[in-house]
Image: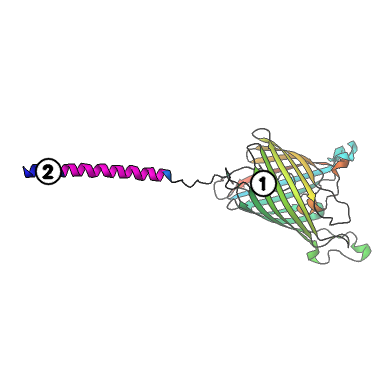
Amino acid sequence: MIKKISLILFSISICFSIKLKAQDDDMLKMLEDSIPKKKTKEYVYATFKGKRLINFHTVEMPGPNSLEFRISHHFGDLNSGSYNFWGLDGGASIRLGLEYSKNGRFEVGVGRSSLEKNYDGFLKYKLIKQTIGRQQPFTITLFAGMYYTTLHDPNAESTGIDRYQYQTSRLSYAYQVIIARKFNSRFSLQLSPTMVHYNIVDKLADKNDLFAVALATRVKITKRISLELEYEYRINDYSVVKYYDAVGVGIDIETGGHVFQIFVTNCAGMIEPQVYGHNTSDWQNMELKIGFNISRMFVIGGKKKKK
């Protein structure tokens, strides 16, 4: 009899302990569910379709292991008339460029421009990426460029003085903090505080440093076509020579691995010292030029990923 009672009590205790353990597990699960889980950051992509809008750099970078070949072409002035076929017959400038990124966040680029026979090199680094939500509302990219002109001084023989007698006189530099936000799938806005430094200036009264703010926007029209606008405002009067703010309006067309841009701008040059500082065309007098940019992306040594 005692053995039977002991067996019954033992069975009851086992069942009771199992029930308590189940209750404890339920309590732990409820406690875990009540603790807020850390949200994974979701990043915003394709703030702009290209790494350049018209003349200005954007916050965008190539994907990992990506090499981009870029051709930029600006024709002559539209107001040159029908004899010059509205600028298409001559007075054109061109730039060829190669730009590479190993990790999709740091980029190095080189190029050669026909205007002033310039060679250029630049570095870009995506410092902060915009996230979905309020964690990080902006994308911020840092830019630094160096430019070297191989132009001969046309007045050297007549004056006996070569303005490029020192190699350092051929150099100029540009620095930017590029800040952009993609507000929705169709609208992006970018602001870029800019500094351009010239080692040599044209007039004694000129300043070596130019400060400007570049504004750029993109409005998506269809899945592959978008409208673009850019404008530069020069902050300081750095030169006694009359220069003008850069303006551009264009259309961006994505076709697979190609991005094709056609636009109208008042800039003959395509590098920062020319675009921001030495722009001699006034858009208000219709001194505008038709131009295009075309780029082709190649993946080297790996699968292309989102930037």
- Numbered tag placed on residue 166 in the rendering: none
Q: Is residue 12 magenta?
A: yes
Front residue of 189 and 95:
189
Q: Estimate the x, y position of residue 94 in percent, counting from the top left.
A: 77, 48
Residue located beneath label 1 in the image: 180
Q: Estimate the x, y position of residue 264 in percent, counting from the top left.
A: 79, 40
Total residue callouts: 2
Element assignment for label 1 = strand
Query: What residue is at 75 percent from the left and 56 percent from the top?
Result: 195
Query: What residue is at 89 percent from the left and 66 percent from the top?
Result: 161
From this viewpoint, which residue is outermost toward the left? 1
Residue 212 shows in this picture: yes
Amino acid type shown at disc 1: Ala
Element assignment for label 2 = helix
Front residue of 72 and 144:
144
Q: Estimate the x, y position of residue 100 in percent, counting from the top left.
A: 63, 52
Magenta extent: 10-33
Label 1 – label 2 distance at C-alpha: 75 Å
* 302 sits to left or right of 178: left
- Kindly indicate the quadrant of the structure image that contains residue 143: bottom right
Query: What residue is at 15 percent from the left and 43 percent from the top?
Result: 9
Q: Estimate the x, y position of residue 169 in percent, counting from the top left.
A: 81, 64
Residue located beneath label 2 in the image: 7
Query: What residue is at 63 percent from the left and 41 percent from the top?
Result: 257
Q: Is residue 167 above or below residue 108?
A: below
Please identify the dominant SS of the magenta region: helix
- Mark 2 crowdedness (10 Å alpha carbons): few <14, some 14-19, many ≥20: few
From this viewpoint, which residue is outermost toward the right? 158
Residue 114 shows in this picture: no
Q: How is the image coloured?
A: rainbow
